Image (cartoon, grey):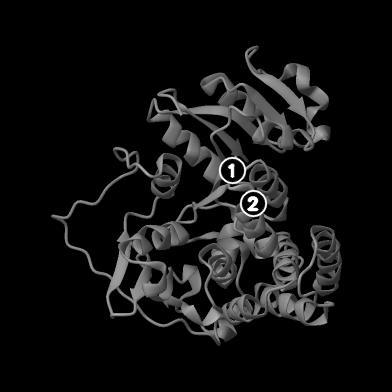
Amino acid sequence: MSNRPKNVVILGSTGSIGQSTLDVIRGTDSLFAYALTAHSRLAEAALQCQEFSPHWFVGTCEEAFSARESLPFPSETEVLIGSQNVRQVVQDDAVDIVVSAIVGAAGLYGTIAALEAGKQVALANKESLVMAGHLVMRLVNEKGGTILPVDSEHSAIFQAKLAGKEKEIKKIWLTASGGPFLRRTREHMASVTVAEALAHPTWEMGRKISIDSATMMNKALEIIEAKWLFGLQADQIGVVVHPQSIVHSLVEFVDGSVIAQLSPPDMRLPIQFALNYPDRKTAVAETFDWQQAMHLDFEPPDLDRFPALGLGFEVAKVGGSSGAVLNAANEVAVSAFLDEAMSFADIVPACRSVLEQHNFETDPTLEQLIELDRWARQEVLRWTR
């Protein structure tokens, strides 16, 4: 590649990861926002296009474009309507890296399209691997693409594992903040309100991910993601609670050495690392002041209080279609809780119920996964009130 800026496609530019990615691009001249996509927040997307002048913008929600004439997209940006255009954009020869930042199952299609073209993918959409890890990693091997993790935990593992050889890794440890209910009893979980669940103590995240953190379903999904991303067995993955969210994860080697990656809880750092890899650039995010006192706490997770973790280990062990079913059930359950149609305490039991009922497939096709995703979403609605 020449000395030109690296062309970046951001799938989901108006979400929290998309906005943080644009903040990283804003702070450097080595990256160019070549294309942006968004679903329905078109006014915000138009302002982003005004600032960054991408070659393309794709609006994936056709209904949202009914008043398109009033949206101030710049003339130099070609506007495409419909999710089918995502494939055209990510597979463009000029694209260097695709940031997969769409939340939920909807992000799978853009990830697959980019990997089919052998692109480098900065993956923030953990659902791509949770739902279809065997298919995604098969594409990586067949087409020559690359996945660079953007989740803070998986970015930390990626960085820490560089200290040794693959065969020398004994176990990885994903850190979990514990969310807002780390000290709350199971009995008190039944009365959790939406506002309480959204009040994460250390991270600023979207609504869905905040609820996943409160149930620790986010960590369950990260266990599954790590299994596929790093080629591990389920028993090589552990979880440790670390409320400060400073140590983002650890790699334990066979000789007993443990390598950790530390940084302030700011998603711009793992995004910047992925976009510039294998180089490191001057920090866009805040850095530590090592002259200030701090302390770091670690403790084992309470699997009785956070049963989602058990689901994560189970699904990582059996693989197959279970990840797609768990993810779909959780997405609908979280949405129902946010709409006050399901209690917080019912989110994980609903997911387990649907998971146990489904017709398990050992090596499902993409079409089978899509059908199971649809089925699981319908099944979990039985739990709504």
Q: Considering depth in this image, is 233 or 223 the residue closer to the camera? A: 233
Q: Is residue 254 left or right of residue 44?
A: left
Q: Earlier in the sequence, mark 2 or mark 1?
A: 1
Residue under numbered circle 2: 103
Q: How many neighbours does mark 1 have within 10 angstroms: few (below 14), some (14-19), or many (20 or more)?
A: some
Residue under numbered circle 1: 15
Task: Indicate the secondary structure of the residue bearing disc 2.
Answer: loop
Q: Position of residue 226 (x, y in %)?
A: 53, 67
Q: How many neighbours does mark 2 have within 10 angstroms: few (below 14), some (14-19), or many (20 or more)?
A: many
The structure residue drawn at horizontal position 85% and vertical position 71%, both measured from the top left corner, is: 379
| 342 versus 65 height, above or below | below
Task: Indicate the secondary structure of the residue bearing disc 1.
Answer: loop
Asked whether the viewer can see residue 245, the reply is no
Q: Quadrant of residue 362?
A: bottom right
Q: Position of residue 14 (x, y in %)?
A: 60, 38
The structure residue drawn at horizontal position 57% and vertical position 27%, both measured from the top left corner, is: 34
Q: Position of residue 298 (x, y in %)?
A: 34, 77
Residue at the extreme left: 291
Q: Position of residue 378 (x, y in %)?
A: 86, 66
Q: Is residue 150 left or right of residue 254?
A: right
The structure residue drawn at horizontal position 59% and vertical position 63%, both measured from the top left corner, is: 211
Which amino acid, by three-letter code, is at mark 1? Answer: Gly
Which amino acid, by three-letter code, is at mark 2? Answer: Val
| 241 versus 17 height, above or below | below
| 150 versus 349 height, above or below | above
Q: Quadrant of the C terminus?
A: bottom right
Say whether marks 2 and 1 touch (CB < 8 Å). yes
